[in-house]
Amino acid sequence: MSKSVVVVGSGNAALCAGIAALEAGARVLMLEKGDEALAGGNTKYTAGAMRFAYDGNADLIPLLRDPEDDRLPVTEFGSYTADAFAHDLLGFNDGRPLSPEQEVLIARSGDTMTWLAGHGVKFDPIYSRQSFEKDGRHVFWGGLTLAAANEGVGLFDMEMAAFQRLGGKIRYEAAVTDLIHENGRVAGVMVGSEEIRADAVILACGGFEANAEMRASYIGADWTKAKVRGTPLNTGDGLTMALAAGAQEYGFFGGCHATPMDLHMADYGNLEIPHGARKNYRKICYFLGVMLNARGERFVDEGINFRNYTYAQFGRAVLEQPGHFAWQIFDAKVFDLLYEEYTFEDAHFVSADTLADLIPLLDGVDPAAAAATLEAYNDAVDESTPFDPTALDGKGTTGLALAKSNWAQRLNEGPFRAYPVTGGITFSYGGLKVDQTGAVLDTSEAAIPGLYACGEMVGGVFYNGYPGGSGLTSGAVFGRQAGAGAAQGG
């Protein structure tokens, strides 16, 4: 008789777990805390980008929604090897070697993308955010090339369609409140007073990013002020239930995926904003300008690396500034390079024809200090090196205590714009330890029978930062692992 599997959650990781379990012959019931509109966890709020190892164009074409796109013959995707992926992850590990979870993520990333494509989950090249036109060609940079067709909502829709094609069932407004323990194993879940029995339970219900008390406890008091980029429903329920069942805390609980966000956005993400703005008010073009805090000072090297490798750290840096905010300042030279989230109707900014007129509009900022900082920055820009947004161009500053290492251009061409930002949290890094089947391990390193986890629930994947696009890939890799493991092991 086929195994029965309950999946808690309905985002990317949950759906990949469900698809894999169904493939392995299990009967799968998915339980979603929210209503149908809020289903999908954080997945719907993402831009749908997925980072994975590949050797060249030939590896990508089979994954595309439109393999006949007339831009492809003049597109240079480059390659992104397993070694490059490892290098990027190590850059955020604070001296730690690759964790076992990171090694799994790298090794299975490409195959998991092929597996998704085989289930009708198709992708588009990220021309608008990950490439620049150069000498008549589309040149991709940073190793991140593809996003799900129709971004995060499209990823959810395609994965849900695959799940249901295979016979998976889902119930909405069915918040799991406890695990059922019987004969030394997890034997199902409680939805309020209702018992739902199963051979295996997969926790795929996100981290604790929407729980201010847990953010403060694990990450720090500043994080009570963070905007939540995604769903309000990821309040650490799965983590709490698993720890109560004897699971071990694992990974870096003091870290999280963060990003600079519009200061005036709502406290949580908004699925009702237009398709092109589903990046949810994030503001990650700081590398094209400068950021000032309330003291009128720059506080990060805005051009230290491609934004794929800095926005998770810079979101934290913004939140930890006085007043938990900063201003991003640009001049007219880069307006056409700003991503669409800077231009949609809900984007907040101030503008002026001169820097002198802009500075008094920077609410909460010391104007004299801001003027001095911007003057010193302009004077320090290297004018002999050409600006090239497709590469680490070395166009930096000289003589500043805090350099801008790349893409430094003088702010000297009006009009000027400034965007107020704060720190937003996407997901937490700390979680549970799982084995090679996705089974949750207890404090003695033994598998808890019948209990599996994936997605944000898995610790050890990220530490002090995050190469963009890795989160969705991690969810898919560990979701697929947990689904297969639950169906086969029960």
Image (cartoon, grey):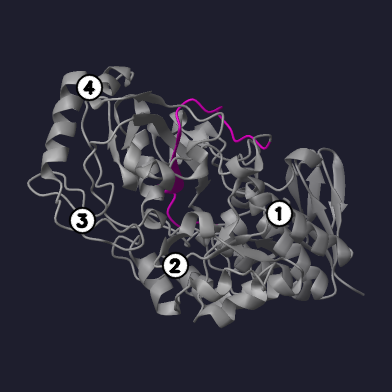
Amino acid found under the numbered disc labelled 3: Lys
Instruction: Indicate the quadrant containing the N terminus: top left, top right, bottom left or bottom right.
Output: bottom right
Q: CA distance from mark 2 to mark 3?
A: 23 Å
Front position among marks 2 and 3 = 2
Whether the residues at callouts 4 and 1 have beta carbons within 8 Å, the answer is: no
Neighbours of disc 3 within 10 Å: few (<14), some (14-19), many (20+): many
Residue 264 drawn above or below residue 245: above
Q: State which tag comes first along the sequence, 4 or 3.
A: 4
Nearest the eye: 204 or 401? 401
**Chain part drawn in magenta:** 248-271
Q: How many marks?
A: 4
Across and down, in percent, residue 86 comes to 40, 73
| The label number, if any, that marks residue 356 in the structure image | 4
Question: Which residue matches tag 1?
Answer: 154
Amino acid found under the numbered disc labelled 1: Gly
Front position among marks 1 and 3 = 3
Asked whether 260 falls inside the magenta stretch, the response is yes
Q: State which tag comes first along the sequence, 2 or 3.
A: 2
Amino acid found under the numbered disc labelled 2: Gly
Across and down, in percent, residue 368 comes to 16, 20
Asked whether 26 falls inside the magenta stretch, the response is no
| The label number, if any, that marks residue 395 in the structure image | 3
The majority secondary structure of the magenta stretch comes to: loop
Q: State which tag comes first along the sequence, 1 or 2.
A: 2
Neighbours of disc 4 within 10 Å: few (<14), some (14-19), many (20+): few
